[in-house]
Amino acid sequence: MKTVKIDGIEYQFDAMTAEQQILANHIVDLDRKLGSARFNVDQMQVGRNTFAQLFERALASEQK
């Protein structure tokens, strides 16, 4: 039997009503998308910080 974990609680997917299954699928999908968005933000923040460091080095090398 397939289970779905929402907010730390496991639910038996096959025991749910059709409406509950649809809602559970939305929650699971949105949790996945939120995790992906956090991952993307982390990547972008590291990239931004790296470019800022490179920019600062480029400015410092002009002043020498």
Image (cartoon, helix red, strand yellow):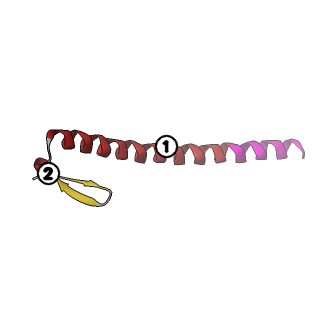
Q: What kind of residue is marked 1?
A: Asn
Residue drawn at (22%, 39%), measured in percent from left and top?
Answer: 22
Residue topped by disc 1: 40
19 and 32: which one is in front?
Answer: 19
Could you say where residue 21 lies in the image, as x and y percent from the top left? 19, 42
Horizontal and vertical percent for residue 51?
Answer: 67, 42
* Number of the label disc, if any, that sits on residue 2: 2
* Prevailing secondary structure class for the magenta stretch in the rendered image: helix
Q: Secondary structure at mark 2?
A: loop
| Along the viewing direction, whichever of 24 and 37 lies nearer the viewer | 24
Q: Amino acid at mark 2?
A: Lys
Tell me: 30 left or right of 53.
left
The magenta segment: 52-64
Image position, residue 40 (x, y; %): 49, 43
User: Seen in the image, is 44 located left or right of residue 30?
Assistant: right
Query: Looking at the rendered structure, which numbered label has been put on residue 50?
Result: none
Residue displayed at 71% across by 44% down: 52
Q: CA distance from mark 1 to mark 2?
A: 29 Å
Q: Is residue 63 magenta?
A: yes
Q: Who is closer to the viewer here, 49 or 16?
A: 16
Indicate whether 16 appears above or below 9: above
Q: Residue at x 65, y 47 (%)?
A: 50
